[in-house]
Amino acid sequence: MPGFNICGIGGSLAATIETRRDHRWVFEALGKGGGDLWPTNALLILQSAQRPNFKFEEPEMHHNQEVARFAGKQDWEPITMTWYDAEQSPDVSFHMWDWIQHVSRFDGGNSPGGEGQYGAPFVQIPGYYKREGQLSMLSGVGVPTERWRLCNTWPKENNWGDIDYTSTEIATIEVQMRFDRAMRLQVA
């Protein structure tokens, strides 16, 4: 059978090659920007995430009865990450809120970038709230086989989820991360 190698018969070594698995991955880093948002002992327990996706704009050139299309600007789509909301110290849920406060102050208080007035949101300096991230796919023995660097990551949308007296589900925090660029790094 083409594409399979069973008992030495077949067209390839596909049966002897390990495939990447959806459940073997880790968000390895949430690096520092201009401020110190994440304590080094914060444990981010992730449930799910997405790998980076991009699309090209398609500029069109019209000529007579035809249209030619070209690859234009590249745009990286935000990724959604879901954390388990663990009761721990330091409190990751609080630090996510603090990160949002570094993007835009909702309380109108003093901030490193300036002051908001009358409770109006105040947008901070990007170098202060953007962070470097790293997402890796792992082999069966925990060695990275695919690594993505997410440049200038920040929380675009946050959802602390529903709460319900009748539920026994584990609470999660869903965050849509926006980033400027993703780079696929060489894994040795």
Image (cartoon, rainbow, N blue to C red):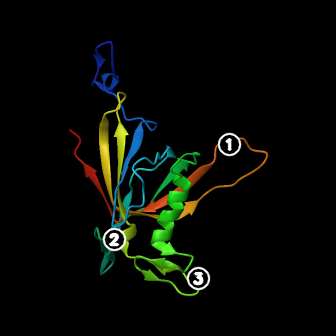
Q: Secondary structure at mark 1?
A: loop
Compare residues 52 and 164 and report the one nearer the observer. Answer: 164
Q: How dense is the environment of label 1, judged by Cα within 10 Å: few (below 14), some, or many (20 and up)?
A: few
Q: Secondary structure at mark 2?
A: helix
Labels 3 and 2: the sequence-earlier one: 3
Compare residues 16 and 184 and report the one nearer the observer. Answer: 184
Residue depth check, mark 2 versus mark 1: number of the one nearer the observer = 2
Whether residue 156 can be seen here:
no
The answer to whether the residue labelled 2 contacts the one labelled 1, judged by CB atoms less than 8 Å apart, is no
The residue lying at 54 percent from left, 87 percent from top is 117
The quadrant holding residue 179 is: bottom left
Q: How dense is the environment of label 2, judged by Cα within 10 Å: few (below 14), some, or many (20 and up)?
A: few
Labels 3 and 1: the sequence-earlier one: 3
| Direction from residue 119 to residue 130 in the image, left or right | left
The residue labelled by disc 2 is 127
Q: What type is the residue that disc 3 sits on?
A: Gly
The residue labelled by disc 3 is 119
Residue 47 position in % (x across, y down): 52, 43
| Direction from residue 54 to residue 106 in the image, left or right | right
Labels 2 and 1: the sequence-earlier one: 2
Q: What type is the residue that disc 2 sits on?
A: Gly
The answer to whether the residue labelled 3 contacts the one labelled 1, judged by CB atoms less than 8 Å apart, is no
